[in-house]
C-alpha cells in the first residue's frame, strides 16, 4: 500500500508526449537564437558570405547566374552550421554539465529529448532560410520554382545527415574536443567540402568533395534551385551519410 498525506493534492500527471517534445523544441530553439556565438555561426557568417559571393568574383562558381549559385551554396552552409556545428557544440556541453543525463530521467525521456532537438534545428533552419532568402531576393535571386519540392527534400536529408554527425561527435568526445573538432570540420568543409564552390570547379579533389555530405548538400540545392531538378546522386549520398552516422551515434553515444 502507498501511504498518502491527508489533504495533500495528488501529483500532477505529466504532459502528453507531443507537448513535452514541442516544449523542449521551443526551449532549444530559443537558446540557439539568443546565443550570440550561435547567431554568428548560423546567420551572420552565412549572410556575409552570401553578400561577398554575390558582389565579387573572387571564387569561380561555374555557369549560371552568380547570385543563384551562391544562394544555393550559402543555404547549404547555413544548414551545416546549425545541424552539425551548432548541434554538436550545444549537445557536447549539455552532456558535460549533466543536462542530458538529467533530462533523460524526466518524463521527456531520451527519445523525446532527441526529437525536441531535431525540431529545434528545423525551426532555426526555417529562420535561416527566411533571412538569407530575403537577402538573396534583394540581391536578385530568382530560384527555380519547379525545384522547390526537390530543395525541401535535399534540405531534409542534409539536416538528418548533419544532425546525426553532430550527435555522433557530441556523444563520443569531451566537450572541449567537440568544440575544437566541430569548428575545424566546419572550416575545412567550407574551404574544400564543395558546399559553396561546386565540386566540379575544384579540379581532381572535386570527385572526393562530391561524396562528402557538404558537397552532396551543395550539389543537391544547386540542382534544385538553379536547374529545377532533383540530383538523385546527391540525395543518395546524403541518405548513406545519414544512415551510417545515425547507426554509429545510436551505438556509441554516451549520455554522461
Image (tube, grey):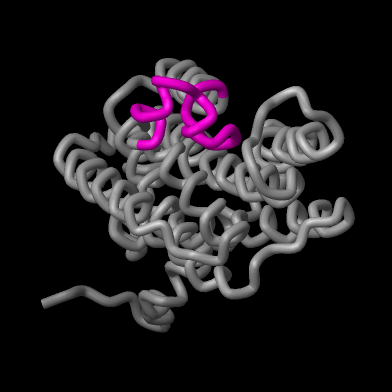
**As drawn, 102 above or below 166:** below
**Residue 179 in view, yes or no:** no
Q: Residue at x 24, y 48 (%)?
A: 240
The part of the image, by quadrant, that contains residue 50 is: top right
Q: Farthest residue toward the left?
A: 1
Front residue of 60/117: it is 60
Q: Residue at x 34, y 38 (%)?
A: 165
- Segment colored magenta: 191-210
**As drawn, 196 above or below 7:** above
Per the picture, the main secondary structure of the magenta-coloured stretch is helix
Q: Farthest residue toward the front?
A: 63
**207 in the magenta segment:** yes
Q: Quadrant of the N terminus?
A: bottom left
**Residue 45 in view, yes or no:** yes
Q: Residue at x 75, y 62 (%)?
A: 142
Front residue of 179/102: it is 179
Left or right: 74 as drawn, with respect to 139: left
Q: Position of residue 189 (x, y in %)?
A: 49, 27
**As drawn, 36 above or below 202:** below
Q: Quadrant of the C terminus?
A: top left
Q: Position of residue 184 (x, y in %)?
A: 49, 18
Q: Position of residue 148 (x, y in %)?
A: 57, 70
Front residue of 215/57: it is 57
The part of the image, by quadrant, that contains residue 13 is: bottom left
**199 in the magenta segment:** yes
Q: Position of residue 185 (x, y in %)?
A: 46, 23
Amino acid at each position: 500500500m502507498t501511504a498518502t498525506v491527508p489533504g495533500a493534492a495528488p501529483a500532477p500527471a505529466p504532459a502528453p508526449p507531443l507537448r513535452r517534445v514541442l516544449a523542449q523544441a521551443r526551449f532549444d530553439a530559443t537558446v540557439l537564437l539568443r546565443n550570440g556565438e550561435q547567431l554568428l555561426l548560423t546567420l551572420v557568417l552565412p549572410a556575409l558570405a552570401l553578400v561577398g559571393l554575390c558582389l565579387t568574383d573572387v571564387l569561380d562558381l561555374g555557369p549560371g547566374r552568380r547570385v543563384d549559385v551562391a544562394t544555393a551554396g550559402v543555404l547549404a552552409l547555413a544548414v551545416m552550421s546549425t545541424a552539425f556545428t551548432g548541434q554538436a557544440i550545444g549537445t557536447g556541453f549539455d552532456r558535460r554539465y549533466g543536462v542530458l543525463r538529467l533530462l533523460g530521467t524526466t518524463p521527456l525521456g531520451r527519445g523525446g529529448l532527441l526529437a525536441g532537438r531535431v525540431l529545434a534545428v528545423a525551426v532555426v533552419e526555417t529562420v535561416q532560410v527566411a533571412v538569407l532568402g530575403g537577402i538573396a531576393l534583394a540581391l536578385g535571386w530568382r530560384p527555380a520554382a519547379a525545384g522547390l519540392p526537390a530543395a525541401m527534400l535535399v534540405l531534409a536529408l542534409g539536416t538528418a545527415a548533419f544532425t546525426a554527425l553532430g550527435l555522433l561527435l557530441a556523444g563520443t568526445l569531451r566537450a572541449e574536443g567537440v568544440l575544437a573538432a566541430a569548428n575545424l570540420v566546419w572550416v575545412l568543409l567550407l574551404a574544400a567540402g564543395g558546399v559553396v564552390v561546386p565540386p566540379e570547379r575544384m579540379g581532381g579533389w572535386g570527385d572526393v568533395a562530391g561524396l562528402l555530405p557538404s558537397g552532396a548538400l551543395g550539389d543537391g540545392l544547386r540542382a534544385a534551385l538553379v536547374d529545377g531538378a532533383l540530383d538523385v546522386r546527391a540525395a543518395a549520398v546524403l541518405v548513406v551519410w545519414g544512415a551510417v552516422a545515425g547507426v554509429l551515434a545510436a551505438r556509441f553515444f554516451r549520455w554522461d
